[in-house]
Amino acid sequence: MKGFSRMRKDIGVLTVGSLVLVGLLALVPLTASPAGQKGNETKGKFYFKQNCKSCHVKDAQGGEITPLSKTQAQWQAYFAKGKHMKGTETLTKYLTPEQLNDALTFLYNHAVDSPQPETCGK
Amino acid sequence: MNRRGFLKLATGGAVGATLLQAEACGMPLRQQKVAKVPAPRLEIPTTCDMCVNKCSLIAIVQGGVVKKLNPNPENPKSRGMLCARGNAGIQQLYDPARIKHPMMRTGERGEGKWKVVSWDEALDFTAQKLSAVKEKYGPQGTLWSSSESFQEQFFRNLGQAFGSPNSVRHPTLCLASVNLAYSLTFGTVPSFDVQNARYIIMSGANRLESFITPDTMDLVASTTDRKARLVYLDPRFTKTAAKADEWYPIRPGTDLAFILAMLNVIIGENRYDKEFVSTYCSGFEQLAEHVKQYSPDWAAEETQISSKHILRVAREFSDAAPRAMYYAGRRSSWYRDDFSMRRGQAILNAIIGNWDRQGGMVPNAKVELGELMFLPWDDPTAPRVDELDRNFPLAAKGDGVYLRLRENVIAGQPYPVKGWMVYKQDPVSGIPDQDKTLQMLRQMDFVGVIDIQMSDTAWFADVILPESTYLERLDPVEMLAGIRPVVVYRQPVVKPLYDTKPLLEIVQGVAKRLNLSQYFDYTMEQWIAEQVKALPMDLPLEYLKKHGVYSSAQFPKYGTTLTPDHRFVTKSGKIELLSRRLQEAGYDPLPIYHPPTQVPEGQFRLVLGRHAFFTHASTTNYPWLNSFSTENTLWIHPKPADSLGIKDSERIEVASGSGSIRIKARVTPKIRPDCVFMQHGFGKHSPWLRLANSGGSDAQLLETAWDKVSGGAAMHETFVKVRKV
Amino acid sequence: MKTIEWQYLIVSYLFLGGLSAGLFFVSALTELFRNDGDAPKVKIAHIGALLAPWPVMIGCALLVFDLGHWYRFYKLFLHFRWESPMSIGSWLLMFFIGVSILYAYGWIPGSMREAAFERLPGHLQFLRILNRDVSGWRRPLAIVGLPMSVGVAIYTGVLLGAVQSRPFWNTNLVAQLFLFSALSSGCALLILVLAASARKFEIHEFQSLYLLDISFLTLEFFIVVPYVIHGELSAEAVRESLNLVLGGPFTILFWAFFLGLGLLLPWAIEVLEALPLLLRHAQLVPRVDTATVAEAGTAVFILRDPGGQAPSRKLHFSRSWAVAAAVLVLMGGVLVRYIFVFAGQMSAIH
Amino acid sequence: MTNRPKRYALAIDAKKCIDCKACVVACRAENGVPLGKSRNWINEELRGDWPKLMEVFEPEQCHHCEEPACVRVCPTGASYQRPDGVVAINRSECVGCRYCMIACPYDARFFRDDLGVVEKCDLCARRLDRGELPACVETCPSKVRIFGDLNDPTSEIHQILEKRQYRVKKREAGTGPQIYYLL
């Protein structure tokens, strides 16, 4: 429940002026996409795969990372911190802020506790 | 075989082929004797596409003619199996009703006046029409509907790159409610380890008749060789019923009552897996409290199954745990609260702790495939026309909700949709309430269809872009997740017989003309090369070309998720008996029973089902399959038949709220007296599908109704009047 | 897949084959056992001989026509398979046709023969070598042909009887039934031809034919009866198959038309007609000259018993009765084959 | 393998048959059987009254008898029995008299109007000679048919017939049928 309220705050910040967010607890995760993150999900997936996946796959140094690796709240916290390699470097080393937002949108929308965990349809 | 025999084989396809081929290569027919010179006999492994099951097969090809399709035993899923449809694949390739060239409509829609055009002309026309719609209504003014295929993604990508949020797929006409119920409970849709089960309860899903898959094979083996018990609920005496140990002609729409009563017994008598429930599940207390009200006696009233049977089945079921399962199977939504019934099943499976155990439910394992990275496009800005977020907040975004979408499009709400691209789908004869589908189709400024045969939808299209059949096509590699995940490969076994193209080339053709080429600047070969990189072998492509399928010996694996720290992909991270997400979305977090609508006096409930000869509406025109059921009949029980004075194979009229048809009666004791049944895929508009025109179409009768949560079309909510004519 | 494969062509073939056999049998029999100068018997043998080859030849033509590949019929004569009734049959038929043609040739009057060969066109002159008088071979040919004709008649029944899988056929009685039905139809055709053709006819001609036919019909009857009884007491499958004629599609045809009209009725007519002839020592003295009989079509005779007293009984003889009896017998012959061919194929072991 | 002569036969576990018709289509495709005719088929029998119903499915085809009536009556020897027990038809020798069809207790034969010859299941002789299984046996999803060499003690069919009870159809026809229906 704690993670939940925190998330709610964050989203609140991110979606000021968003038509859809009525602030109802129930609606938060539903409106999470696309209104949850204003970034571009398709592009986010692209950047994530192109940049992160090089190290973050099974048995690679970074260890496997997928959207399911974290909850929506955790993803937001992680990107808010923007730290990489145990904090030794910043994410901006790899992606522009805009690209990062896109990546976050993708990861957030398919996070382990998201409404669309498994990629749709398949 | 003598020459006469040789020619006569045409019925069987094989020589039809030589002739067609001869024709295709512009070779004069008298030269066709050439084909008699014994050509080398090739065995080419590839993957079936006669239904969605993706069985591996080996095509026997001689002189550029497909002689026979044999099963490929190397696939641990389909093993040495090829069903009737699979064997009839030859007839899809050599089907005279195939679309042999791009065609454009010259007369009115559905008038059947066509002109054969060049690909350039057809693609220019398509692109120009799509742009015109975009011009006027924005990209969201186009609708992109498609069904599953290895290449479907290219079609959907085109729709998205074009800027339309409106893609609609088959699940809401199919297993949407199952998928959603299991996802919300376990965070994923598991497979059922039928092969090792000891006790199987199946309701609705008619898995020995409707669809021949590995589960079918395992089901037969389990119930015969390993003496597993099969309890089967169905208003109809199907072939599954014939093989079941117990068959109960349950009152339609009351399955949930049966399930809730089982929960009531199993929890009430402390027969559930306490350790499993306390370790992995959440919301048990509320569940226990909730099912107290649903006693076997109460359920007996609802289901018309005596309470002593319900009681016994519940006990036997929990005794057999964890090698017991309430089989979900592949099936459609039947009632407006179909989703709750699925949830009930999922919960029942959960509390006996059959999760991730041998003979229970197992989360699907995967084989990693590589992915070709292509330039991403901007996400569509407009909301979906079916207003998913408002109507079905939990439904899968990419799939859409077909019937809701149709309502909105017809109403022009929230915005007009005037362009319709259809791939490998036949909404006109496939979807309930045909009049509405036609209404939706008629209000379109443009309808483009990509298909292999002149489907009813193609019949009403403005332009038809013919796709090559699966035996003529190179497809992306496909990974089938499951207890034994496999990677299957589809390679062309003959050159295209006619002026057809694989979908990717069609998509690229349209994309080029819409200036979207940058998103599709790759070849099928490049795409596949990227995919197979991830396979654990050197020369993976050669391997697939040779074997047609790859699977790893490390499967099956049980219990990978059975560690206390495992986080299920649900809101709470646990198996949610009480679903947080349902609660948040304002639905009942626990399945609540709502009795089905009573059958009005003098009417019948129209129940549907599939037969494994026919893949939905698509294979009824292939003579080898059609010969098993040359026209659909209306099953009606002798008692009502007598009182209506209807004799077997008499013509009768069947009328519902949305239409009426003429059809032959089949008086049989194999169905409940309050139900009637008919097959799907007949009564076509398209005269090209001559064999399938006989009998009426269920799509004309079925009324618009959907499952409240998943949006899946509710197929058993239609009541019909039957009378002699 | 259950289908009725053998139909009317085969029915007609079985009938015609039997008919020829019957004709030859009667002809040969009379030829062999007549006393010299017995004009009526000569006439019977003569007509029988001339008629015999044709039906079987037509029948065989139908048979060949019924094949999937008519032009492949020669293959039948590339093999001899003693287990196959059809193989034996085809060889038997071939030889029988040969013999019966030769036999018929032997009965053609010399003058006629000469005349025919005279009229041969030039390029066919070589055929003159055939211009031989073989009338001397009649008796030997009759002796050779007699068993063959019986063989052919039996074979038409064996062809069906040898099929174990069709309980309706699978009894040796079928062969016998077909044999006697064949012989009686042979007789019947002769009676018909005589009665229809001969303007001035000779009661003695009919005498022997009636006697023969009555005995054949009697025998046939006493095979039909045991066939049914035997079947009813036999294996379940056979009993089932018999339902086809006892309360089945063929019941009326079998009992009313075949047994009644086709067998018993003609038998009765012939017995009534010939009864007097059957009486021992009866000798016939025409009361009116046979010329008038010719017109009237009816002869009245007085029977005088050995005592030699005054007229004791009258006998009346009718041409139309003869024709009627003959036609009925022939119809019966066709029917029995029709019934057996169709019902047999419908019957099966369950 | 021993050099004991082969004796091919079929064991059919009809309980496993779900009447899916895969065998029928596979046969049609393999042997070019025209529509309306079939070398193999599935007998259906529905018993009882609603709701106490039961239905049995039983695949059938040529029984490849030990003493084939069809071979016996064939006047030209077109119907013959191979050393391995397979009863086959030599099309070029068949005159189309259909005597064999009438002689077959199982009605397993049919007439090819298009070819003028009789046809029936030959256990996919061409496939056997390539060392493959008959099409119907191979394709069956529930593996109803067990095909093999009775004379090979190691063969599945040999062993299953030793273990399990079976019946043959129409034994009284006396042709020695070689399809064994497992009980």
Image (spheres, coloured by chain):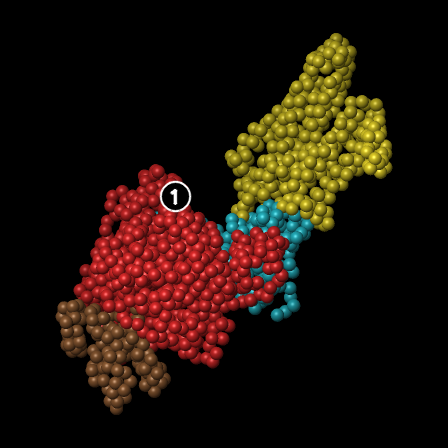
Identify the chain drawn in yellow: C
Picture coordinates of residue B76, whole percent (x, y): 44, 70
Q: Residue at x 86, y 32 (%)?
A: C133
Left or right, residue B96 beside residue C149: left
Q: Residue at x 28, y 76 (%)?
A: A44
Left or right, residue C31 beside residue B615: right
Q: Residue at x 31, y 42 (%)?
A: B722
Which is nearer the eye, A12 or C198?
A: A12
Amino acid under disc 1: Lys
Subunit of label 1: B
Left or right, residue B537 beside residue B567: right
Asked if residue B37 shows in the view, the reply is yes
- In the rendered view, tell whether residue B707 sits above or below residue C59: below
Count how many numbered circles sit on residues in the image.
1
Q: Secondary structure at mark 1?
A: strand
Q: Give the colour in which the image draws chain B.
A: red
Identify the chain drawn in brown: A
Asked if residue B48 shows in the view, the reply is no
Picture coordinates of residue B193, whole percent (x, y): 37, 68
Picture coordinates of residue C102, whole percent (x, y): 80, 35
- In the rendered view, tell whether residue D101 sits above or below residue C55: below
Picture coordinates of residue B634, whole percent (x, y): 36, 46
Residue C259, quarter of picture: top right
Q: Residue at x 31, y 62 (%)?
A: B131
- Please give the residue where the numbered disc 1 appears in the rendered image: B664
Which is nearer the eye, B282 or B340?
A: B340
Mark 1 Cα-neighbour bin, 10 Å: few <14, some 14–19, many ≥20: many
- In the rendered view, tell whether residue B410 sits above or below residue A60: above
Identify the chain drawn in cyan: D
